[in-house]
Image (cartoon, rainbow, N blue to C red):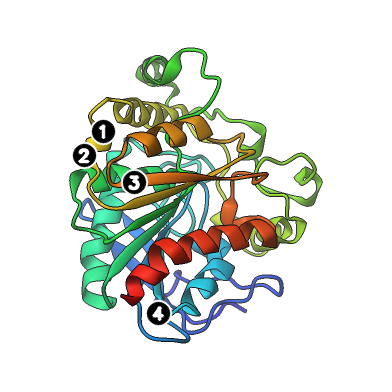
Amino acid sequence: MANVVSEYGAQLCETDSNPMPEGAKSGFFKTIDNVRLRYALWPKTSGVSRGTICLVHGRSEFIEKYFETIADFQVRGFNVATFDWRGQGGSDRLVSNHRLGYVEKFDDYITDLESFHSQILLPDCPPPFNLVGHSMGGFVSLLAAARNRMMFERIFLSAPMLSLDSLPLGLSGMASFAEILCFFGFGQMSVGRKDDRVPNSKNFPGNELTSDFSRYMRVVDIYEKRPDLAISAPSFRWLAAAMRAMSKAENYDFPEKIKTPVLMLAAGRDKVVSTGAIEHLGLNMRSGRHAVIANARHELFMENDQIREQVFAAFDAFITEQATD
């Protein structure tokens, strides 16, 4: 049975392999452009209060996938606040094909984050507010920070999606190509790689996301119980939006716009996003830096225990110890 809900339809799904962290409250809120997003809040479970972690996910992800990580934050003295991006998880889907990854423009994701900050974090959660973001969510967080450095005290990112490797036309060229296809009516046609498929046990060998079988299968268990949470391949419209946003972030002045302290962790064996792009930005941000976790695949929080220990050692040095001061 699903556990603790505050509004019908906002249920959080737990399974035997993925128990829900203690004290969950879930519901919906509406963004300033009237999109309904599912969110969830958790209180700290031990220690002195260190404020709130705002946790934002990658493309195709959802709240339940991070139950283990949420519990890790709780025992460190943090409240946790998180939500599903528009078009995925338990939030409003934007097109009739609910399995298609779709967004009109990446600024819409910034609207999601800003609306969550103003409507949920500020009134309902204890400060200070620190952000933890993965992949697409990490990139959106940097875009938001470039606009408003006052939203978060510090930003901790796992494999942020700053660029993709082996693009035949570069980011700007790929953006233009995808935009042309959208203009001719192909915006809702799917495009993607093999790891855009919904996970199942047969796909674990050679997957690009994690080396940890139990954590991989935990997501499979969730999809079996709540198939409505799944999306698969992105659309050409999503691709156009992503490539255009990443191409703008390549501009020489982008690092200077980020004033919030940032730590980015890159995965040494990442085949989903560009580790080189993370290293380049880390070397050019005055307020930020980066580190590479050797032998890790893309989903650092879903990796094996040894890699997760390195991730949380970096988190504790960058966030937990600062929140204690």
Q: Which residue is at 20% across, 55% downward?
A: 32
Spatial separation of the CA atoms under disc 1 and disc 3 = 12 Å
Q: Which of marks 1 and 3 is in front?
A: 3
Q: State the mark number for residue 288.
A: 3
Q: Residue 322's x, y, as percent?
A: 34, 68
Say whether marks 4 and 2 touch (CB < 8 Å): no
User: Can you tell which quarter of the image residue 302 is in?
Assistant: bottom right
Q: How dense is the environment of label 3, judged by Cα within 10 Å: few (below 14), some, or many (20 and up)?
A: many
Secondary structure under tag 3 reads strand
- Chain-order first, disc 4 or disc 2: 4
What residue does disc 2 label? 257
Tell me the distance, in whole angstroms, between the alpha carbons under discs 4 and 3.
38 Å
Q: Residues within 10 Å of mark 1 (few under 14, many from 20)?
A: some
SS of the residue under disc 2: helix
- Which residue bears the numbered disc 4? 6
Say the numbered circle drawn on residue 254.
1
**Could you tell me how far apart the alpha carbons at marks 1 and 2 are, in whole angstroms?**
5 Å
- Residue 116 vs 236, above or below: the answer is below
Please state which amino acid type lies under the numbered disc 1: Phe
Q: Which of 169 and 258 is in front in this view?
A: 258
Q: Write the residue at 63% across / 76% down.
A: 19
Q: Which circle's residue, 1 or 3, is located before the other in the chain?
A: 1
**If you read the primary sequence from the N terminus, does the residue marked by circle 3 or circle 2 appear first?**
2
The image position of residue 229, as x and y in percent, is 55, 56
| Quadrant of image for the N terminus | bottom right
Inspect the image, locate mark 2, and give the three-letter code of the amino acid beneath it. Lys
Residue 55 image point, x, y percent: 41, 61
